[in-house]
């Protein structure tokens, strides 16, 4: 092989190597570089709450809700404020989480502008972030005058399970502000369903708007352009000229025939406004906090509630009606014949948060009827939520249909196992029976209430009686029991419930009156049964040893015979609790409405030896009308003579304390 041939081969080989290298470089640039850039793009972070520019107050708890998404899953999320790390939360799953919800708390301590940054890191430790700026101001609590003079009020009907603190928080008030407008409301007592509270309307300076004498600045109107004025860049058409005399005007040039008219533009797609109302929200468990991201038709995504969490209702249900039902339902403009609903909900326990699932539903106009629609969303880890909503043809939606009320509620007795002829021997039981004429397919059963408190549910739409223990019809003394029945569908406070039936009232007997009879003092006259050195006038007559009884309606206390002081001395005043050698000389009795009260004192002179003499005896009887709290006097004397002068006499001061 010649050297020329070898040289040509080497040159060709070098050229091929260069081409391969160039192609490899281009392939790396077009295929490898974008992949690396995609890996380095970092997570997408969305701060749901608070919003940019929000104003909060010093010391106010700020809940930061954020969501991070990344195809490679997110390992941790961080909250930074003004360059300082506030909280870091790692994924509960070793392989990361997508989406990753973050709930964090920050409490501003100083006024001014503050920057909140939420940063997320994927499993490759590549970060992405989002930020919002907040304006922090000093708190200025609104003033409500005592008694709410001059303050606009509106009424709030208390629902079952509501508390004063929860109602105040819902209206962004304090319990004290509501108490100021509801004199007589006991802050320590539980609220009763059906009570009406007066709620003050507090308007902050930001909501007041411009002052009454505010006038907008005048609008400057540009000067009119004179007619036929030549504008820059345009030439005015020459005026029409008359033909010279003797000349005819040139014939008019006929315009060419018009071509086919252009087609009419298509009619614009009509836009209708529908009503969207959410009625039930149930989660797989009772989370500490729960909120949802909602997209309706063509509207932007919104967080519901706007800040914070739904309020719990019963079990795993959350109060979505307070946000998206009734006066809070949403008008939604819709173009075309599809109403799109997209929802994703998040739940937290402590600082750990999870996506509970995500769904997208498209509803044609055949479903815009106001009928209830139920959808369940399932997350990858088994968590779920269920929502019930409806799309109404008009806004606002018609009130949610409720079942008719039960009728003719009455107490009855009967055998619970069937008609007498086909029934084995069984006891006759007390029961409540009623009539109901509604559609049983529209209810879940019936609820029994006593004094507006639900006792239990009967989950049988076909039921028309409830067997109850006899004690349900026998209230204790002094109490009144009122029973009513409702038809229901769904959980209490979440589903629908009929108006109450007629009311059955049972009244307990009057309670016995409790009377504490206290024998306070003994005021003696002459005591002559023992020797009296000065008789007459018996100034130093005394009985050193005696036995005494105090009694009322069969209850009694007694002093044993004791030799020694205190003596029973003529013309003296002595506390009976000392004389009886007791700390409390009182007797407690209970009186029915028709019982009299009889009380008295008996004393026996108890000298050493077998002999003794009846010294004092006296009783007094009061009718029920005379029994009242206060002091009363009892007269006692020696029973040996029926007329004065008696051998011994004394007055007893008695105090009655009556408790209904």
Image (tube, grey):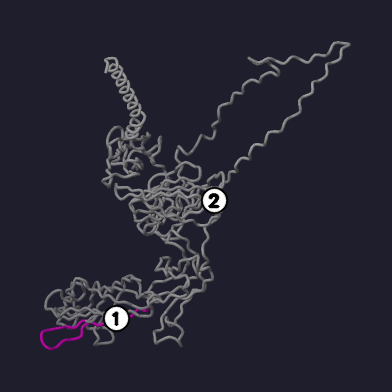
Residue 73 spot, x, y in % from top left: 32, 42
Q: Nearer the viewer, residue 575 or 122?
A: 122
Q: Nearer the viewer, residue 432 or 648?
A: 432
For marks 1 and 2 on the same chain, the one whose residue lies earlier in the sequence: 2
Which disc, if any, is residue 98? none
Whether residue 89 is visible? yes
Q: Determine the CA span between mark 1 and mark 2.
A: 83 Å
Q: Secondary structure at mark 2?
A: strand
Which of the 4 image quarters holds residue 620?
bottom left
Residue 266 spot, x, y in % from top left: 63, 39
**Residue at (45, 42) in percent of width and height:** 301
Seen in the picture, residue 362 relative to 521 is either above or below; the reply is above
Seen in the picture, residue 427 relative to 266 is either above or below; the reply is below
Which residues lie in the magenta part?
Answer: 603-624
Q: Nearer the viewer, mark 1 or mark 2?
A: 2
Which disc, if any, is residue 364? 2
Whether residue 176 is visible? no
440 left or right of 190 in image:
right
The residue wearing badge 1 is 553
* Furthest-front residue in this view: 1
Q: Secondary structure at mark 1?
A: loop
Q: Residues within 10 Å of mark 2 (few under 14, many from 20)?
A: few
- Image quarter in which the N terminus is found: top left
Residue 179 spot, x, y in % from top left: 40, 52
Seen in the picture, residue 452 relative to 78 is either above or below; the reply is below
511 left or right of 259 in image:
left
């Amino acid at each position: 092989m010649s050297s020329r041939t070898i040289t040509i081969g080497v040159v060709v080989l070098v050229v091929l190597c260069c081409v391969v290298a160039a192609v490899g470089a281009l392939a790396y640039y077009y295929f490898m570089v974008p992949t690396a850039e995609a890996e380095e793009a970092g997570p997408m972070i969305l701060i749901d709450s608070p919003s940019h520019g929000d104003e909060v107050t010093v010391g106010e708890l700020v809940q930061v809700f954020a969501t991070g998404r990344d195809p490679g899953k997110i390992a941790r999320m961080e909250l930074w404020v003004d360059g300082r790390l506030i909280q870091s939360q790692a994924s509960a799953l070793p392989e990361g989480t997508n989406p990753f919800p973050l709930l964090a708390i920050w409490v501003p301590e100083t006024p001014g502008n503050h920057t909140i940054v939420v940063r997320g890191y994927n499993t490759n430790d590549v970060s992405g972030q989002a930020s919002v700026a907040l304006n922090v101001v000093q708190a200025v609590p609104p003033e409500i005058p005592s008694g709410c003079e001059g303050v606009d009020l509106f009424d709030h009907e208390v629902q079952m399970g509501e508390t004063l603190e929860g109602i105040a928080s819902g209206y962004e008030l304090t319990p004290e502000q509501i108490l100021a407008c509801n004199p007589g409301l006991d802050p320590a007592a539980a609220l009763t369903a059906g009570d009406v509270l007066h709620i003050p309307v507090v308007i902050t300076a930001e909501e007041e708007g411009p002052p009454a004498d505010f006038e907008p600045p005048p609008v400057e109107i540009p000067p009119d352009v004179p007619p036929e004025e030549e504008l820059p860049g345009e030439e005015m058409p020459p005026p029409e000229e008359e033909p010279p005399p003797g000349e005819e005007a040139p014939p008019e040039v006929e315009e060419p025939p018009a071509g086919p008219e252009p087609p009419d533009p298509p009619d614009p797609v009509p836009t209708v406004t529908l009503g969207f109302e959410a009625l039930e929200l149930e989660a797989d468990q009772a989370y500490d906090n729960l909120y949802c991201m909602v997209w309706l038709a063509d509207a932007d995504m919104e967080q519901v509630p706007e800040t914070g969490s739904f309020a719990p209702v019963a079990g795993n249900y959350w109060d979505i009606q307070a946000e998206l039902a009734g006066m809070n339902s949403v008008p939604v403009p819709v173009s075309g014949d599809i109403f799109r609903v997209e929802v994703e909900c998040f739940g937290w326990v402590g600082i750990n948060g999870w996506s509970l699932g995500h769904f997208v539903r498209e509803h044609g106009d055949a479903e815009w009827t106001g009928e209830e629609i139920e959808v369940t969303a399932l997350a990858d880890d088994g968590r779920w939520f269920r929502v019930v909503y409806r799309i109404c043809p008009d806004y606002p939606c018609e009130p949610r249909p409720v079942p008719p009320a039960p009728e003719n509620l009455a107490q009855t007795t009967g055998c619970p196992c069937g008609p007498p002829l086909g029934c084995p021997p069984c006891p006759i039981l007390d029961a409540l029976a009623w009539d109901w004429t509604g559609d049983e397919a529209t209810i879940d059963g019936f609820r029994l209430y006593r004094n507006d408190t639900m006792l239990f549910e009967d989950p049988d739409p076909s039921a028309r009686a409830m067997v109850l223990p006899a004690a349900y019809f026998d209230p204790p003394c002094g109490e009144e029991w009122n029973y009513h029945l409702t038809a229901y569908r769904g959980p209490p406070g979440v589903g629908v419930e009929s108006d109450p039936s007629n009311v059955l009232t049972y009244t307990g007997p009057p309670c016995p009156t409790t009377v504490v009879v206290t024998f306070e003092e003994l005021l003696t006259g002459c005591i002559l049964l023992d020797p009296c050195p000065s008789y007459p006038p018996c100034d130093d007559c005394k009985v050193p040893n005696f036995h005494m009884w105090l009694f009322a309606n069969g209850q009694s206390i007694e002093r044993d015979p004791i030799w020694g002081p205190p003596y029973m001395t003529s013309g003296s005043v002595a506390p009976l609790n000392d004389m009886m050698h007791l700390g409390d000389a009182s007797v407690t009795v209970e009186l029915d409405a028709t019982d009299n009260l009889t009380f008295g004192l008996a004393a026996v002179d108890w000298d050493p030896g077998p002999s003794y003499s009846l010294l004092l005896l006296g009783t007094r009887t009061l009718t029920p009308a005379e029994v009242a709290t206060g002091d009363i006097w009892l007269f006692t004397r020696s029973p040996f003579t029926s007329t004065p002068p008696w051998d011994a006499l004394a007055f007893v001061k008695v105090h009655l304390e009556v408790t209904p």
